[in-house]
């Protein structure tokens, strides 16, 4: 059965990295605002930090998981990892944000994070479109960290 419908969600960082990343984004934004309000004339500091803050936000939005033509495509920072849907055996998920995708071709599973809304959308899409993939809920799937 051919599935041409495209599905796309934005991935999240690992929780500790996400806190650090978004703190740096907010910090650069507020430095830009403070520099703009501090000086009465045009200054390049506020422009530089404003562009840096926007660039960091754009980079965070570039982490995506899309499913099209029976392929799971992980896109991050101009790199792509493509996994065939037929090779995926199981997806483990927790009540929090973590998901683990088990592939029968690779030794190491793929670990990624989604926010709650995107996780529910992803799991319902996989359940309907790929009934052969086993969905398993675990209490703690990232306990080794």
Image (spheres, rainbow, N blue to C red):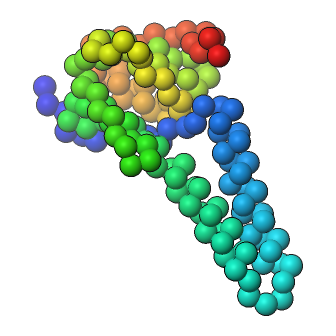
Residue drawn at (77%, 71%) of the image: 33
Which quarter of the figure has residue 130? top left
**Residue 65 location, quadrant:** top left
Furthest-bottom residue in this view: 41
Location of residue 120 in the rendering, given as x and y in whole percent from the top left corner: 49, 29
Would residue 91 be seen by someone viewing this image from the given angle? Answer: no
Which residue corresponds to the image point at 32% horizontal and 16% vertical from the top-left? Answer: 106
Residue 90 falls in image quadrant? top left
Tell me the quadrant of the picture where the N terminus can be found. top left
User: Which residue is at the far right?
Assistant: 38
- Residue at (71%, 51%) from the top-left corner? 24
Quick check: 92 left or right of 28?
left
Q: Is residue 131 above or below residue 121?
A: above
Q: Which of the image's four quarters has the C terminus?
A: top right
| Direction left: furthest residue | 1
Q: Is residue 17 above or below residue 104?
A: below
Residue 18, above or below 34: above
Q: Residue at x 48, y 23 (%)?
A: 111
Q: Is residue 88 left or right of residue 40?
A: left
């Amino acid at each position: 059965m051919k599935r041409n419908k495209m599905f796309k969600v934005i991935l999240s960082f690992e929780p500790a990295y996400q806190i650090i990343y978004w703190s740096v984004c907010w910090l650069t934004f507020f430095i830009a605002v403070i520099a703009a309000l501090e000086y009465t004339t045009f200054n390049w500091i506020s422009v530089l930090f404003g562009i840096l803050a926007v660039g960091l936000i754009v980079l965070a939005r570039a982490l995506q998981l899309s499913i099209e033509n029976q392929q799971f495509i992980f896109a991050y920072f101009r790199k792509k990892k493509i996994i065939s849907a037929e090779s995926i055996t199981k997806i483990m998920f927790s009540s929090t944000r973590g998901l683990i995708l088990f592939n029968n071709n690779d030794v190491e599973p793929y670990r990624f994070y989604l926010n709650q809304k995107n996780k529910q959308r992803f799991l319902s899409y996989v359940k309907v479109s790929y009934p052969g993939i086993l969905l398993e809920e675990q209490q703690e799937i990232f306990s080794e960290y």
